[in-house]
Amino acid sequence: MLQVWTVCNQKGGVGKTTTTVALGGLLASHGERVLLVDFDPHASMTAYFAHDPDAVKRSGYELFHHPDGLPAGLLQELVVDTGFANLSLLPASISLATLDRQLGASEGVGTILNQALFAAREHYDFVLIDCPPILGVLMVNALAACQHLLIPVQTDFLALKGMERMLHTLDMVNATRGEVIPYTIVPTLYDRRTHASVQALHDLKKHYDAYMWDGVVPMDTKFRDASNLHMPPSLLAPSCRGVRAYKRLLKSMLDGSLRLRHAQAARRNDALVEGSPV
């Protein structure tokens, strides 16, 4: 069964692209067929794999201009090679930034990616979506399509404010879907030598402990090296501390230990049904 994970936060610079690429690379190395979806107009993940966003001929933008229904096989036509086995990419282009102005509140626009992934479900085992930090058509599509949300949060003093915005957005999407999207908070860019990182991690646990992964992704220069070489970190430095952290995160995701606790999920679902605040 196809698994769709969205990586999202309404604060930039928190490690969304690194998280998406690292987990995708690890899954691909395990033999899983992985599609990485770049839904950020900044196209960081597209550039990560040495595709020039300004020169990409076709991108995810094309999914949004078929009012009579998506043509069969369109998603597969848009996917490009990353150069690594089992790892494919739906690239981004700057034109994605125009979608909100073009589409506005058009009916059905929030489920287009979900439709495209459903049509291509036989081709992949996992889909990982890299989101823009701005609430709009792209983020709504990425949240509507996913089965689990990963929220990378940089361990600094702005982390809590970014979490508040993200969870407010998530509540709105949950209300529209009529069900709760399980989510996991992933502390990133952690530097135990600094008081700011230690304090931010403490504050995150204080407020969101039930939804947090029990590890951290540390600062690691190997991530930058991997980006410069356009390759997943696990292939460049499989034993570095950053990759080891993502291996632990992936194991937790796959064994289901990071799903919402049943009681909490039930309470939030009940609140949505009753229309009360969540």
Image (tube, rainbow, N blue to C red):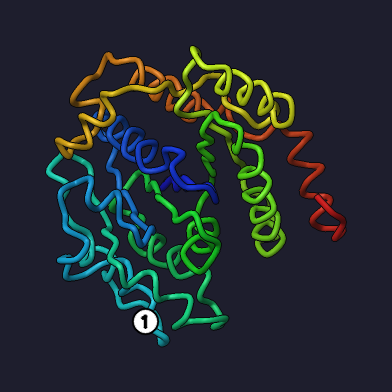
- Residue depicted at x 62% and y 42%: 182
Viewer-nearest residue: 230 or 59: 230
Residue 30's spot in the image, x, y percent? 27, 28
Percent x, y of residue 169: 65, 56
Q: Which residue is mark 1?
A: 65
- Please identify the residue farthest to the bottom as the structure is shown: 68
At 33% from the left and 22% from the top, the residue drawn is 220
Please state if 248 lies on the left or on the right of 232 as rendered: right
Q: Name the quadrant containing residue 53.
A: bottom left
Quarter of the view holding residue 97: bottom left
Q: Is residue 270 above or below residue 135?
A: above
* Residue at (25% x, 25% y) in the render: 234
Is residue 245 shown above or below 264? Answer: above
Q: Is residue 174 left or right of residue 191?
A: right
The total of numbered circles placed on residues is 1
- The residue lying at 28 percent from left, 58 percent from top is 90
Q: Split into 4 quadrants, where in the image is the N terminus?
A: top left
Report x, y in % for residue 109: 50, 75
State the SS at label 1. loop
